[in-house]
Amino acid sequence: MISIYHKKTGDLWYSTAIEHNKIWGIVFTRSEKEALNKLLASLPYKKPFKLENTASALAEKIFDIMKSVLAGENVSWNFEFEQSHLSPYAQKVLNCLAKVPVGYVTTYKALARTVGGGPRAVGQIMALNPFAPLVPCHRVIKADFSLGGYGGSSQHSQLKRTLLQREDKGFEKPSQVETKSGLLELYPVRFLRKD
């Protein structure tokens, strides 16, 4: 059975769904109700769950790492993500995306070129990413270096810009990272258009 934990830290609510030390989903938002609703929407239909009153040690660690990622810190972790409920394509996209380091972005087009498919298909996976911000969909932008959407909506674009600004580490040259699907093109955060 999936255990659901949630906690308010500062002005954000963090939620996570865990079973057998694997993360089924994570969410951060300003509303407790929205955090729980978004988390439940990301879980498979008819999968039993229970809402826990106290966060487990693993949940607390997840919340601490999420807070650090949102602050733009370069942190590492070794969490396992439960992906069996996701399509093979979604798994491929998210596993590739997980390789994008702090200080860099990639594009929907570059991600699609690496994993196969098209930029719109990649964008749909980003909009439904159950592991944000640990699997950093905020680090995916349009090919023209404009922002693109975030959180399944272009309304969250200011949050995306803020996260990326916090992550700017001063890199100046494009790079690449090796993934199971091939080389993924990376661009310094500062390549992001200001408009």
Image: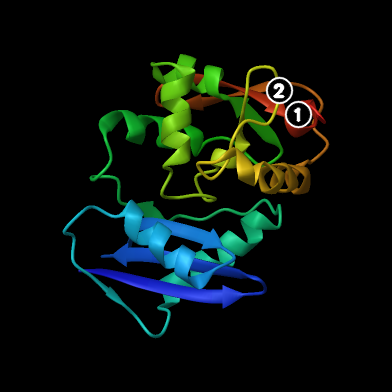
Numbered badge on residue 145: 2
Q: Is residue 191 left or right of residue 22?
A: right
Amino acid type of the residue tagged 1 in the rendering: Leu
Residue 21, can we see it? Answer: no
The foreground one among 34 and 180 is 34
- Judged from the image, the secondary structure of the residue bearing numbered disc 1 is loop
Q: Earlier in the sequence, mark 1 or mark 2?
A: 2
| Residue named by callout 1 | 192
> On the image, which quarter does residue 25 sit in?
bottom left
Q: Is residue 71 above or below residue 90?
A: below
The foreground one among 176 and 37 is 37
Residue at position x 57%, y 53% from top? 76
Q: Is residue 111 left or right of residue 5?
A: right
Q: How many marks?
A: 2
Residue 104 placed where, x, y %?
Answer: 68, 33
Disc 1: CA contacts within 10 A as few (<14), some (14-19) or many (>=20): some
Amino acid type of the residue tagged 2 in the rendering: Phe
Residue at position x 29%, y 55% from top? 43
Residue 9 placed where, x, y %?
Answer: 61, 74
Residue 132 placed where, x, y %?
Answer: 50, 49
Of the 4 image quadrants, the one containing the N terminus is bottom left
Circles 1 and 2: CB atoms closer than 8 Å: yes
